[in-house]
Amino acid sequence: DRIVWAADSFCGLPRPDAAKYPADRDDICYQREFTAVSLEEVKANFAAYSLLDGQVRFLPGWFKDSLPDAPIARLALLRLDGDMYQSTLEGLTYLYPRLSKRGFVIVDDYAASPCRQAVEDFRNKNGIGDPIVSIDNWSVYWRRS
């Protein structure tokens, strides 16, 4: 009975805004075509596993544009794959307040320095002391207390 929200640009990564987010200054991921997966392809992948139904909702656009007013009331699980400092920070800023107590945060790109810095900056700013648990060499999670 839960809604699965998939927020993505569906067109790759944004150009870094080095003035506002210096940690992204050297990021070149926006130039990598393989990061752009269309909404149609994502829907086809959901459908291939019989998971595309009325409970799956898509929020296309850059996080700074699509997340602030997203019609998401509560989340049980927040999985971030933002790659960059800006995207990771925006995901946490706009969605973490909607995460239920005892809900989980998974961060896919924690091993990348800009992503890790965004997570650490957000957690420090918000006094989050919940232990970070390593999933593998690249990803981590924590459970909101």
Image (cartoon, helix red, strand yellow):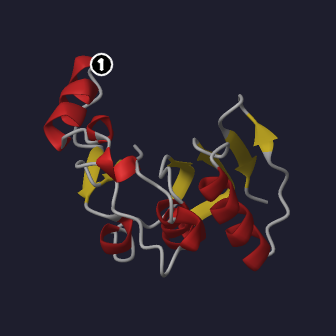
Q: Is residue 3 visible?
A: no
Q: Secondary structure at mark 1?
A: loop
User: At which x and y percent is residue 68?
Assistant: 39, 76
Above or below residue 135? Residue 58 is below
Residue annotated with mark 1: 49
* Residue under the image location 48 percent in, 81 percent down: 19
Residue 141 is drawn in which quadrant?
top right
Q: Quadrant of the C terminus?
A: bottom right
Q: Is residue 22 visible?
A: yes
User: At which x and y percent is residue 105?
Assistant: 63, 50
Answer left or right for 103 relative to 72. right
User: At which x and y percent is residue 42?
Assistant: 24, 35
Answer left or right for 123 relative to 109. right
Question: Few, some or many C-alpha atoms within 10 Å of disc 1 (few <14, some 14-19, many ≥20)?
Answer: few
Answer left or right for 63 relative to 115. left
Q: Quadrant of the N terminus?
A: top left
Above or below residue 73? Residue 27 is above
* Residue under the image location 18 percent in, 27 percent down: 44
